[in-house]
Amino acid sequence: MRRCFGVLLVGWICLAINGSRGLTDEPAPKWLRSTAYVIPKYTATEGEGYFAIIEGLNRRLYIGTHANGVNSWLVEFDPAASKMNVVVDAQKAITVQSSGFATQAKIHSRNNTGAITGKIYFATKQGYPAANESRLAYPGGHPMAYDPATGKTEVFPIPVPHQGIISVTPDEARGVAYISTCSDERPIESTHFLVLDLKTHKYRDLMDCQHMYAFVVVDHLGRAYHPILGGDIARYDPATGKLDRLKQTIDGQPTTKESHLADPESHAINWDISPDGKTLYSLPMSTNQLYRYDLTAPGDTLAGKSLGTLIKDAQNFDCRGMCVGPSGAVWASVTHAVNGIQQQHLVRYRPGDAAPRDLGPIAVRNPDFTEFKDAAGKDLPFHAGFGKAADGTFTTKYVTMGVCEARDGSVYTLVMHPYSVLKLTPNDLPK
């Protein structure tokens, strides 16, 4: 599990299973035509990236990158100008230059935008150690806040030595942000749930939840939620300073093994919250099932509800990118094996829908968006993530990462080899 969330589950190692068949009374979804934009290649030297994407209040996107053993950068993408611009160099920001495993190699965090200041909150984490490197060589990750209005970056202290950071969620109205760390150990890792005072830069360590890749969310009452190993959920209330440990059910029953919601060794689970802060959506990476929790209900149990499958008849399933957009719609960038590639689908769920809707596989309308070969005509390294489907359509081949809905209704997904963003406008999407 060396690369866990970032590992390339390439389609050629999968069985050529056509999992996209619809129900007999549903036509197969048609290709969605996206426009691709390559992220500056020196910021993603191995063609990889993660789910670090968010829209700022200025309608520009902010994307985290990964260059193992080198550094990481925050990239600003202006869709109106079709322009990428590097705005934060992680190691320059912390004023420490390192190499190897000691570097701030990833911005892997779920990025978030401050509702009051418009600052972009993100964080750094460790890359992959070489065989002769100790995990103690990594000093620890830093939360950061980049202000697009001034171009300045505020760097917060390392919360837990030698641990990276996978989630930073601001609550600027209350002057705090919530942090989830990651030690990257397996099978059980350490993941501290902390409160960061944005003024004093001091932390309060609430507990070690031991749950991999946790996305902290904040509800309508300012309460922060973090998953716990084994299926429970930590909820911190800043009004009382109290930390509660909640149980969860799905459709009135205990969680099942197949749901991956309560794995004894943890499982990567996508979490995001509705714009009004009253509904939590959950999508385990390998489950092909979307769940919803009502955060207004009383009691010490979160009652979840199954909303339905995302890809009909899929024989395998991988989702590393899910978000709830400003419209209130849930979006998921999903892949499953089809004819030797991990075919990317976009799935949407709107409150009130009977079930999630598979909008279709995503194609790339501009296959010449970047160079794939060098001057001698040889394939460039880490550029094998695009190619043709069985019908000749140019598309992506590997598992995908982040997804983000913009306020103009466009949807963006992050794909790999090379690390790129795909844009779907409202005109590209079914109504």
Image: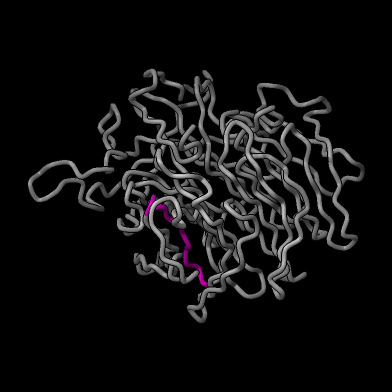
Res 407 → quadrant: bottom right
| Image x and y of residue 392, in percent | 25, 32
Residue 144 magenta:
no
| Image x and y of residue 418, in percent | 31, 47
| Image x and y of residue 232, in percent | 78, 37
Closer to the camera, 135 or 164? 135
44 with respect to 297 (left or right): left
Up/down of 262 relative to 73, above or below: above
Give the residue at x 44% y 54%. 105
Residue 67 magenta:
yes
Up/down of 64 relative to 10, above or below: below
Span shown in magenta: 58-69
Q: Residue furthest bottom?
A: 150
Q: How is the image coloured?
A: one colour
Closer to the camera, 113 or 132? 132
239 with respect to 189 (left or right): right
Give the residue at x 9% y 51%. 375
Give the residue at x 44% y 56%. 103
